Amino acid sequence: DAGITQSPRHKVTETGTPVTLRCHQTENHRYMYWYRQDPGHGLRLIHYSYGVKDTDKGEVSDGYSVSRSKTEDFLLTLESATSSQTSVYFCAISERGGAYNEQFFGPGTRLTVL
Amino acid sequence: TQLLEQSPQFLSIQEGENLTVYCNSSSVFSSLQWYRQEPGEGPVLLVTVVTGGEVKKLKRLTFQFGDARKDSSLHITAAQPGDTGLYLCAGAGDMRFGAGTRLTVKP
């Protein structure tokens, strides 16, 4: 199994509070991704990174920011959490981008915003 | 925007039956991937298909990429309870996923 961990695995928070989710990899892969998974929507890309300090927006980036100061860590921040951000969040890594970006996923973080 | 539509949404079958699930788009993809996700876990990559008309086999699973590279199918022969899960297709370079087919195989 690819070495990907996510923390925390579960979190309950209140509307308006800031939340940071962490993804940590031990594979030294260049690309890292944050997705959210909701019933009926599959996985939707929030942000991704193609190198240290290099990030770009995905399909559902509003309300989220990311940072990558080290190869191994990719942080997802909800500056002011809303109930619509209740979801399961997955981090993924890949060695290559483009058509050959075979992604390995972490175990997920279940976030509930009350 | 390259949308991926998967069908059926839900499929419940008995052990030993064969099944096919589909992934369709109106756009051309450079490659398509299939993932399987079990409850409480992240998706796991099964296969990447790149060439139009390509067929790949993984034990009892057969993956086909359409000639026009707009669609793909996954066929499972003699399904087993261990095949139960959510099957997702994804446009690799696009990083977009379909909503998935949830398969249940009953013993």
Image (cartoon, grey):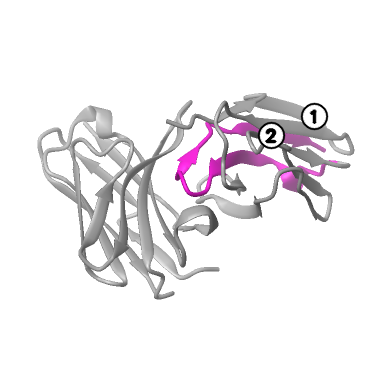
Q: Nearer the viewer, residue B2 or A36?
A: B2
Residue annotated with mark 1: B13
| Numbered disc total | 2
Residue B42 percent location from the top left of the image: 50, 51
Q: Nearer the viewer, residue A33 or A112?
A: A33
Within 10 Å of disc 2 (Cα), the crowding (few <14, some 14-19, many 20+) is many
Q: Is residue B32 visible?
A: yes
Residue annotated with mark 2: B103
Give the residue drawn at x 36%, y 60%.
Answer: A32
The answer for which chain carries disc 2 is B
Badge number at residue B93: none
**Is B96 covered by the magenta stretch?**
yes
The answer for which chain carries disc 1 is B
Q: Amino acid at mark 2?
A: Leu
Q: Is residue A102 visible?
A: no
Tag 1, which secondary structure?
strand
Q: Nearer the viewer, residue A32 or B101?
A: A32
Residue B38 percent location from the top left of the image: 59, 46
In the rendered structure, the answer to whether residue B105 lies left or right of residue B17 reads left
Tag 2, which secondary structure?
strand
Give the residue drawn at x 65%, y 51%.
Answer: B50
Q: Quadrant of residue A33?
A: bottom left
Q: Amino acid at mark 1?
A: Ile
| Highlighted range, magenta | B79-107
Q: Nearer the viewer, residue B25 or A14?
A: B25
Pointers 2 and 1 in contact (C-beta within 8 Å): yes
Give the residue drawn at x 18%, y 31%.
Answer: A82
